[in-house]
Every structure is written in C-alpha cells, then in structure tokens.
Image (tube, grey):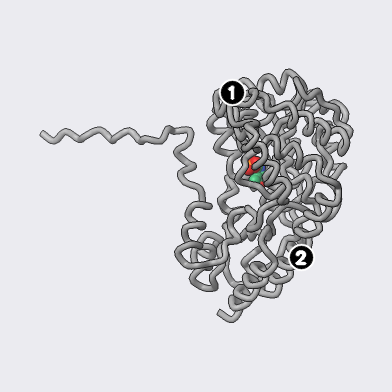
C-alpha cells in the first residue's frame, strides 16, 4: 500500500508567507553582478554633514550611549525632537511622556501597528505602499485595505471618496505617508483636513509616516497632527535617515499623546529595547543645525529630481513629477513595454541601470504593472551617467 507522506510544514508562518525576500535584495545583487548604476534602493551615495559624523565619534569616545540608553531615548534627543516639532509646526510635546526614540522609522511603524492593531482590525493605507507596511499589518494580524493613488496629469492623486468608502466599522486606523514613497505625492492642506475630519467623525487613529518632511520641492509639508481633533489620535513618525543622509544609523522617533506613546513603547521595548546609543546624541545635534542646512539639502535634491526627470523624459519614459522624497515614478508604455518586472530585470543588461518595478508596492499588482521607480538621491555625475545610459533605450 502506498502511504503518501504528509506535506512538510512550511518554515515561514502563514502571516509572512506572501512576503518572501524583498525586491531590493534581488535588484541590488543584480546591480553588483552587472556593474550597473543602482537607482533602486533609496539611500544617498554620500554621507551627511561632517560635523554630525564627528558628533557621533565624540559620543563614542566620550562613552555617551555605549551602554543601554534609556528606553524612551536619551533626554538630549527627546528634547531636540520636541523642539523640532514645536518650532516648525507648533506641535507642543512633553519630551518625557510624548516622545519615543526608535530603531529608525521602520521600528516605529512596526511597534505602532503591533501596539494598536487587534487581529481582524482593518488598516486603511495608501497604495502603492512603502514595503514594510503590508508586512507589519500582517504581523499584527490586521487586514490591510488599500486606497490606491491614481496617476493623472503627470502626478499621483488621492481620491477622498475612495478613502471615505474604504472606512468600515472594523477600521482601526489610517496609515498615512506624506511625502509619499514611491509616488512623490505631498498631500495638500485640503486633503489632510478632509482626512482629519474623517478620522474624527469615525473615531479612527492615524499613524503617519513623515520621514521625508524636509524633502518637499513643491508646496509644503503639514503634519496631520496639527489639524483639529488630531493631536490626541495621531502617531507621528519621523527619522534622521533621510533628513541627515545617514540611513545606516537607524534613528527614528514617534511623537504622540502620552497614552499612544505608552502603547507604542510597550511593543517597542520587546522588539529592540533600545538602539543606536551614540548616534542618538549626534542626531540631537543634527536636529539643531541651522535652517540653511535643511534648505540646502532640499535644493540639492530638487536639482537632482529635475536632472533625472528630464533625462528619463528624454529617454522616452512618461514621468510623474514628484513633489517630494527621493524617487521619481515613470510609465514604461511609451517605450513599448508594459511589464515593469520584466523591464527592471532586463534593464541592467540592456543599459547598466537598476530600477524598481512599482508593482511590488501594490496589492493590485496589475495597477502597478507598467510603472518603474528610480531614486535620485545620488551624486550628480552618477545621475548624469545613468541618463546617458538610459538614452540608449529608445534606439533598442
Ligand atoms: C526609508 C523609509 C522608512 C525607513 O526609515 P528608517 O528610519 O531608515 O527606518 C520609512 N518610511 C518610508 C516611507 C521610507 O521611505
């Protein structure tokens, strides 16, 4: 008699099975193997300010932060974060009870969702998503409900009616991201006011990822926490990585009302407990850099956006002009292509450039199929070389 062996149980649990390894690992490996210019992953190819790097060295040498820092973060950094929110946005936070330092925004996102979402709760999020959102919602046992940003007239737009329709009695929170990765959309005051009214009316929490707050090229960034009724129901997430060009330091933070910070801290303490001791002192100094630093960073990246966007248009892509972030999204259909995955897998061999297919950021993969994302947070000569290489595409 033939007895069939039982199917071996998969190692990766059911919640995470769909996520596998990220596209960034595959594409970065491809970039290395082919000697391509990597415009896939969003990290700068030059470090942030020397004096901030030196501040980290000093902290290390002086023995500040070399042992476990306090759970909520070192007081110098919490005070600097509170000052940053107050002087820029008029948001007043008590550094002791309303600020929490995390291992990058990534941990802040994970801890917020693990703390605030019950299994079965719905989380409404803007699609395409930053890639950790779907995985974190899944780890929390939540159900993600995408509201898709639609490409129109050279930019991506939120449909407020769609957002309103996505909210049900099971919705626990709205997960926002502005400036938005990967589309570069910066939500307007009117859009944020409408989202705030919806959150108040339906008694929802809002978790908002604002890591690109200092990288807005057109318009302005407004934290949703500043709108009426939002201060007490919003978890605002920031990070030093993108603002100071030290993405490897992994210093992020949460600002919110005391009960929300306490909830997020409950999850955070069992994820990393604490992190990045000496870097916390350096980031405290970075947040106090003069306004000329922040303006300079923004102007530099705006020029890079313009350089790469023009080059992509010349090479035959349809370009969605980003108002903020590190990224520009393109449509490959004018090049006679419609499968972003196939296009990105072939691009390194064709012309020595690596990009990311936007489909990976969608639940509705077909919605993202013909779109491809390029990062412009690279040195000008690197972008120029990439543009030169991409020009070869149209000719075959
Ligand atoms: C880069 C990025 C993060 C991660 O920030 P870290 O501080 O490096 O963890 C979070 N959200 C968005 C939208 C990002 O682009």
**Residue 364 on image: x %, y %:** 58, 48
Which of disc 2 and disc 1 is earlier in sequence? 1
In which quadrant of the rendered image does the C terminus lie?
A: bottom right
27 or 65, nearer to the observer: 65
Would residue 235 be found to the left or right of residue 269 on screen? right
Q: CA distance from mark 1 to mark 2?
A: 42 Å
The residue sitting at the left extreme is: 1
Give the image quarter of residue 39.
bottom right
Give the image quarter of residue 237.
top right
The residue sitting at the front extreme is: 62
270 or 313, nearer to the observer: 270
Residue at the image position 88 percent from the left and 36 percent from the top: 87
Q: Which residue is mark 1?
A: 269
Secondary structure of residue under mark 1: helix
**Residue 16 on image: x %, y %:** 47, 36
Residue at the image position 56 percent from the left and 50 percent from the top: 360
74 or 7, nearer to the observer: 74
280 or 44, nearer to the observer: 280
Q: Which residue is mark 2?
A: 306
Residue at the image position 62 percent from the left and 20 percent from the top: 266
């Amino acid at each position: 008699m033939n007895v069939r062996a039982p199917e071996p149980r998969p190692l990766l649990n059911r919640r995470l099975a769909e996520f596998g390894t990220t596209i960034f690992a595959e594409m970065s490996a491809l970039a290395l193997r082919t000697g391509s210019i990597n415009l896939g992953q969003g990290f700068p190819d030059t470090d942030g300010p020397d004096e901030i790097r030196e501040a980290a060295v000093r902290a290390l040498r002086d023995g500040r932060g070399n042992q476990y820092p306090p759970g909520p973060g070192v007081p110098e950094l919490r005070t600097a974060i509170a000052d940053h929110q107050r002087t820029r946005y008029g948001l007043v936070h008590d550094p002791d009870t309303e600020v929490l330092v995390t291992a990058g925004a990534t941990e802040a996102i994970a801890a917020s969702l693990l703390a605030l979402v019950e299994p079965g709760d719905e989380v409404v999020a803007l699609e395409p998503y930053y890639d950790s959102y779907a995985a974190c919602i899944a780890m929390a046992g939540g159900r993600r409900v995408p509201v898709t940003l639609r490409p129109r007239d050279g930019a991506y737009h939120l449909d407020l009616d769609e957002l309103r329709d996505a909210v049900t009695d099971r919705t626990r929170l709205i997960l926002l991201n502005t400036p938005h990765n990967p589309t570069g959309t910066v939500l307007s005051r009117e859009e944020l006011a409408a989202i705030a009214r919806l959150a108040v009316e339906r008694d929802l929490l809002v978790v908002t990822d604002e890591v690109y707050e200092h990288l807005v090229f057109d318009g302005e960034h407004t934290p949703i926490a500043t709108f009426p009724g939002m201060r007490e129901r919003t978890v605002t997430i920031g990070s030093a990585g993108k603002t100071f060009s030290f993405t490897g330091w992994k210093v992020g933070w949460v600002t919110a009302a005391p009960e929300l910070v306490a909830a997020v801290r409950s999850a955070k303490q069992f994820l990393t407990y604490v992190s990045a001791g000496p870097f916390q002192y350096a980031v405290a100094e970075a947040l106090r850099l003069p306004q000329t630093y922040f303006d300079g960073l923004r102007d530099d990246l705006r020029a890079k956006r313009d350089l790469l966007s023009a080059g992509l248009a010349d090479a035959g892509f349809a370009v969605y002009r980003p108002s903020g972030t590190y990224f520009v999204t393109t449509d490959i259909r004018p090049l006679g292509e419609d499968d972003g995955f196939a296009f990105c897998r072939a691009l390194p061999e064709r012309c020595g450039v690596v990009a990311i297919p936007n489909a990976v950021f969608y639940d509705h993969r077909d919605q993202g199929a013909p779109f491809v994302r390029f990062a412009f947070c690279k040195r000008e000569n690197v972008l120029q070389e990439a543009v030169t290489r991409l020009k070869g595409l149209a000719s075959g």
